[in-house]
Amino acid sequence: MKPPQLPPLPAKPSAAASFIAVTAKLSLVIAAMALAWSLLQLLVAALMGRMDILRTMQDEGLPVPPGMLWLSEHVLSLSVLGLLLSIAFLAVSWALLRHREWGRIGFIVFLVLVALANFAFLPLIHSMFDSMQAMVPAEFLNSPQGLEMRVQLRVGLWTSLITSAVTALALAVLHGWLVIKLSRPDVRALFR
C-alpha cells in the first residue's frame, strides 16, 4: 500500500507579482481614503452653499481675494471632480490588482499626473500667502504688530515653498521609480 501523497506546495509568487500585489493593495487603501475624503468634501461644499462665508467677510469689511471668489464659485464642481478622480483611481487600482493591462497603464498615467500636479501647485503657495496678507487691513500692516505678522508670513511662505518643493521632488522620484518598475518586461508579462 502506497502512503497518501501530499499536494504540492503552491508556487511562491514572483518578485514582480508580489510587487504588483503590494502596490495595488496600498493604492486601493489610498483610493478608498480619497473617496471618503471626496464625499466629505462634497458634503461640506453643499453645506457651504447654505452659508455665505464671503458675504460675512465682506460685511465685516474684510477684502476677499480673487482666488477665494473663484474657489467659492467653483467649490461644488471642484468637489465633484475630486470625487470622480477618486472613483477613477479606485477602478485603476482594482484593475492593477487584477492584472489588467488598462489598469497598469492607467496607474502609470495617475503617477505621472500627480507628480506633475505637485510641481504645478507650487506657485499657488505664493498667491495663498499674498491673499492672507491682503485680508489684513492696511492700518494694521503698518503697525509694529503688523510688521511682525508680515515677517511671520514671509517665513511661513518660504518654509511652505521649500517643504512643498522637497516633497514634490521626493514624490516625483518615487513615482518615476514606480513607472520604471511597472514598465519592466517581467512586470508587463503579468498583465493581460
Image (tube, rainbow, N blue to C red):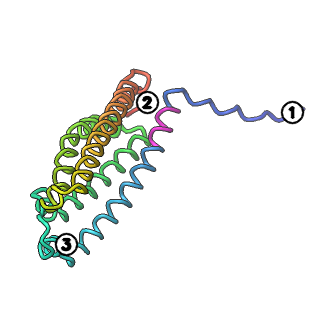
Q: Main secondary structure of the magenta part?
A: helix
Q: What is the magenta range?
A: 18-25
Quarter of the picture containing the C terminus is top left
Residue 3 - label: 1
Whether residue 22 is in magenta: the answer is: yes
Q: In which quarter of the image is residue 158?
A: top left
Identify the residue under disc 2: 190
Q: Say which of 128 and 154 sits in front.
A: 154
Q: Residues within 10 Å of mark 1 (few under 14, many from 20)?
A: few
For the residue marked with disc 3, what is the amino acid? Ile
Residue 69 place in picture, x, y as percent: 11, 62
**Disc 3 marks which residue?**
53
Q: Is the C-beta separation of discs 2 and 1 under 8 Å?
A: no
Instruction: Residue at 23% x, 55% y: name it.
Output: 144
Mark toward the viewer: 1 or 3 = 3
Q: In this view, does 72 lie to the left or right of 105?
A: left
- Marks counted in the figure total 3
From mark 2 to mark 1, how far is it between C-alphas?
38 Å
* Kind of element beneath mark 2: loop
**Image position of 23 (left or right of 54):** right
Estimate the spatial distance between the alpha carbons at disc 1 and disc 3, rounded to whole Å. 79 Å
